[in-house]
Image: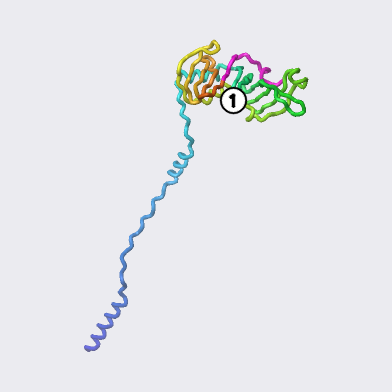
Amino acid sequence: MKKIYIALLVLILLVSCTTQQPTTPEQPTAEPEEETPIETIQEIEETLEEPEEEIIKIPNDIKEILENGKTKLDSYSYNYKSPDSNLKYNMYVKGSNIKITLPEINTEEEGKFYNTIYFDTEKKTAQAYCIGYSACEGKVGKVKDLNYEKEYIETSLDWLDKVTEAEKVDERQIEGRNAVYLETNIGKITVESYYGFLYRIEDGNKVWEFTDAAFNSLKDSDVTAQ
């Protein structure tokens, strides 16, 4: 009986050793990363894509003068001289049509000449013409089409569209008309007060001149090819 008891005790100990498994420390559970909401991502992308707005710093009274050209000028003509040349171009502007009389006759192949360019700013076209029987040696009319971007000369009002900052220096007379002298982001400029016509730009040693101006006196036939 005693032997049976001892045998049972040994069997219990063996069973207990084989079923007991070593325990390992519990690993901490990693918390899932917080996802950025789709709406937030879209807002960030839209913010990055938005272009910076150009800040315009012009006093109201000066702004009104600069915009007079758009409201009071139906047409205008003037002589233009750039800092790159002493030659003057005769400019005639009415609506989207511009005629430029060149200071010198350009010679083309086969004895053709042209002394006038007609521009259409809406269609972006430029056409070379020869006008004046003696100047063209009898070969009057259209000579050829030109590259619009290459030949175009910015008008007085084109330059004023570039002004985003302006401060009045003083008031003065130019060609017998009242004008304002302004310090701007494109240089020091002289602008006629009533029509808002740009007469002069000074940028360091460079000077652009828009002289002998006449206002609202052109007909359509003055700026279009006949």
Please tell me whether residue 3 is drawn above or below residue 126 in the rendered image. Answer: below
> Which residue matches tag 1?
84
Q: Residues within 10 Å of mark 1 (few under 14, many from 20)?
A: few
Nearer-the-camera pick, 75 or 91: 91
Residue 123: percent from the left, percent from the top? Answer: 65, 28
58 drawn magenta:
no
Q: Taking 226 as reference, is 212 left or right?
A: left
Residue range of the region highlighted in magenta in the rendering: 209-226
Nearer-the-camera pick, 136 or 45: 136
Nearer-the-camera pick, 52 or 155: 155
* Rendered-image quadrant of the C terminus: top right
Please tell me whether residue 52 is drawn above or below residue 31 in the rendered image. Answer: above
Residue 223: percent from the left, percent from the top? Answer: 66, 19
Q: Which residue is farthest top?
A: 176
* Rendered-image quadrant of the N terminus: bottom left
Which element is circle 1 on? loop
Nearer-the-camera pick, 17 or 226: 226
Residue 14: percent from the left, percent from the top? Answer: 29, 80
Residue 89: percent from the left, percent from the top? Answer: 63, 20
Residue at horizontal 31 percent and vertical 75 percent from the top = 19
User: Three-letter amino acid code at disc 1?
Assistant: Asp
> In which quarter of the view is residue 16 placed?
bottom left
Residue at horizontal 33 percent and vertical 60 percent from the top = 28
224 drawn magenta:
yes
